[in-house]
Amino acid sequence: MELVLTTHFGNDRYRHADTYEQLGGYAAMRKAFSMPKEEIVAEVRKANLRGRGGAGFPAGVKWGFLPKDLSRPRVLVINADEGEPGTFKDRLIMSRGPHLMIEGIVITSYALTIHNGYVYIRGEFVREAEIVQEAIDEAYAKGYLGKNILGSGYDLEVTVHRGAGAYICGEETSLLNSLEGKRGWPRVKPPFPASVGAFGLPTIVNNVETIADIPWIVTHGGEKFASLGVEKDGGTRLVCVSGPVKKPGVYELPVGISLRSILYEHAGGMQDGKALKAVIPGGSSTPVIRADEIDVGYDIDSMQKIGTMAGSGGVIVIPEGTCMVRALSVLMNFYAHESCGQCTPCREGCGWLARVLRRIENGEGREGDVELILNVCDNMMGRTICPLADAAVMPAQSFIWKFREEFDRHVRDKKCPYGNTF
Amino acid sequence: MPNFTINGISVDVPQGTTILEAAKTAGIEIPHYCYHPKLSVAGNCRMCLVEVEKFPKLQIACNTIVTDGMAVKTDSEKVKQAVTGVLEFLLIHHPIDCPICDQAGECGLQIYYMKYGLHKSRYAVEDKVHKKKVQDIGGQIILDAERCILCSRCIRFLQEVTGTGELEFFQRGDHSEISIFPGRPLDNRYTGNLADICPVGALTSKDFRFKCRVWLLRGARSICPGCANGCNVEAHFKEEILYRLKPRQNDEVNKTWMCDPGRLEYKKANEARLLTPVNRENGIPKAAPWEAALSSVAFRLWEMVEKHGPGSVAVIASPQFSNEELFLARKLADEVLRTPHLGFSLRTVGDGFADDFLIKADKNPNTRGAKLLGISEEKFDDIVQNVADGKIRALLVFGNGIADLSDAETGRLLANVPFVVQIATNEGAVSRAAHAILPSASFVERGGTFTNHAGRVQRFWMGFPPRGKARSAIEIITGLANRLGAGWKSGGEAQVFRAIAQSEAPFAGMSYESLGELGQTAGGKG
């Protein structure tokens, strides 16, 4: 099986520029410098590379949104905030192969005539930020960053910026505000970052994994990358499997592989004595699916067809014996805590959902509470500046839609059938 | 010019107009909280969601620019459900303490609840998040964090208008609240605007707090008399008591703002008023009927002119008075008393602070008007010299103070004059020394015009008739002139203004109609 990213992740030295280079690193950068810029962009378009941060927007198309004129400097921002519960792939790239990301930054910036890049790293990723900074220092020392890279006359400065641990700062416009030293609140769009982004400049925001795929695409060509995946969704994905499987962890797998294969072949199946109840397939914000729905291709479009999302690649396995009310309660507490407080429906709605779920779980549910949750969800969905409200609503709705009986039973019996309280 | 339809009505709007503004031209109200025409767009309250054809999601009207052929719906079921939903969200943690809230009656939550809500609460009372009430955050403002809907208007005002940035959001989610930074209260001269722009009862005015229910108030369009800027205001009163001044939009003058000192100018109409004509007999002030007061003043003035010549009489006018009143004062001096001694004295108040926004150093509303009407400020010094030299036998003073003279200085100066008559609204150094006092109406008890520092002639309207026995200065001056044989026709301020427009070049061609609500700039130099 062809690997794009993780081939050498077992090598502890791979995070250093020397080893990375010995194993073929930075060749793509050299190749890119000899290519016309448009050709690099064209290869990425051909690669069908869909954004790995969660929304799955085609990277090449996104790049095309930059204004044509070069009168204003442009900025590349790498979203390394990785806050989506269940997702832990970007930290793996940053700690095991940071030069993949750096090389991707150089190629992308060169192709888009960008001279300033920022890596916005989640506050909790202390060690990862250190490793990335060390790798950047190495790249500067080798002349792969800084002035006149490889004698090409091209300059690029890359700065690491550490966040302070807010989930909302993974949303690209809050991230930009936070990067600028402001409160991490999403921006009203339009204008979109491609025209007014970081520091008011045209800005591209890409996820770590997305950008780390770029060197491979340049080396092997867009078509080759595309062929690894499925139609309109190319390459491989880092899939993060968590929960009571035999081998939880990050797996690099071709886009479109079946979810069943991810769980039962790669992750080794359920731990002994456990049966699969449900899967949250793409990070905590994606709609939950039942155990009988896992025969689906793990790619953006196939997942969408069955009403869920591949999202950020965080597969959360839920075993039988888990109280779905409690599980959803845990999630809603998270969203209530992380809602930035800007838009009314999200600010008030997330907390409302969390409180109603808590009382249902505690056996204090009132008749009509389940309908109330669904109705509050309707009033939140699609009504806010950023998708955080949707991110809370999608699990809430899907948990109830797929496991309604469990919720009703809590209310009817005035207790949790699993004996939980919150 | 893009053409679009809103609820089926076709409208042309200028390029770049938002749906929210465009809807106004079609007479359609789109409910909103965070949007304010003079502040940047925040887009966070989500009340102005509308349905735009070809957009899968509802769009916020405040940040969506109208394009040609766009079709917008504000009355569909989807929109109604969204608006009601947002309103419900805004109210779940709200304390609903309307009975003790000053905002009641002019509260955005109450108004929209009656229009778009009317739902029963589905939220458990015990789940309400409580926040700190009654916080003195400085300036003229009290903050009640529990009532706040986090629309961010106040924060944007302090960032974009005053540039002082005292307020910020703290916390997240439904624990979010606005607050000042520890130990850093509001520190600017425009804090009162925060209470105006706050759509709910979160930011209320310390001064107005618990004074009067707003639905008992009536309003008169007026001009702030506090300085030469001439901010357009609404004067709110109940019966004969003025309760507050609120800015009235005039983009040429004050946009939608006014300063804190200006807001307190209303007190002059309530406090230390001269409400009855007074004659001083043997040093003892005695209330007199108007007829007697006017007759005796006219007689004394006539007597002085007869005995000592017109040069023995002087008139000190005041730019606290309207163009109409100053015009008649000038006519009285020039044509009736025929004295050369006519000047005006500038009121000085406080530190004479001025900034580059609304506050002017000149604390008089009509200095420019006085100058344009040919009344000289320079003559004032000359008059004072003549008074000190004992050459003035009768002095007519407008207003309750003379320039920046202290009480003692005023008393000493006026002791040189055998007969001092005052036309004024409030007590002051002059009224303690005057031999006759003719009480004049406050700025909300009469109509007229002021000319601001930039030469803009602006009307103010009568809210209620003069308190007590006070009369408009037009009536008082006319009464004196006619008792001195002038034979003026009595008329209101509109007629006087017509006369000004006919004879005074800077005001040529103006009329109350042409001034309208927002005024007009005078020609000529002042």
Image (tube, rainbow, N blue to C red):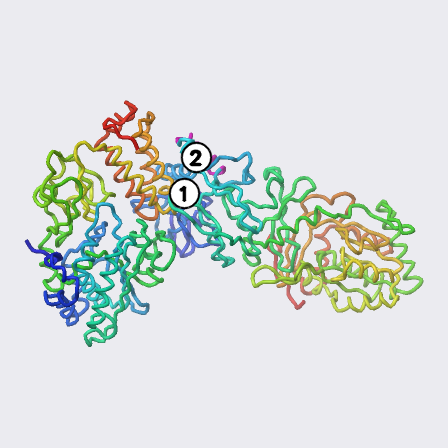
Mark yes or no: residue A370 visible: no
Mark yes or no: residue A244 visible: yes
What's under tag 1, amino acid-wise?
His
Residue B503 in which image quadrant? bottom right
**x and y, in percent, of residue A152 in the image:** 20, 75
Note whether B389 is above or below A128 in the view shown.
below
Stretch in magenta? B110-122
Residue linked to disc 2: B117
Q: Is residue A236 left or right of residue B258?
A: left
For numbered disc 1, what is the local secondary structure?
Answer: helix
* In the image, farthest residue toward the right: B307
**x and y, in percent, of residue B174 in the image:** 39, 42
Note whether A237 is above or below B103 in the view shown.
below
What's under tag 2, amino acid-wise?
Gly
Q: Along the line of sight, which residue is nearer the eye, B383 or B178? A: B178
**x and y, in percent, of residue B410 in the image:** 80, 60
Q: Along the line of sight, which residue is nearer the eye, B342 or A296? A: A296
- Mark positioned earlier in the residue sequence (2 or 1): 2
Chain designation of label 2: B
Q: Quadrant of the C terminus of chain A?
A: top left
Q: Is residue B194 left or right of residue A377?
A: right
For numbered disc 2, what is the local secondary structure?
Answer: helix
Residue linked to disc 1: B175
Q: Along the line of sight, which residue is nearer the eye, A49 or B130? A: B130
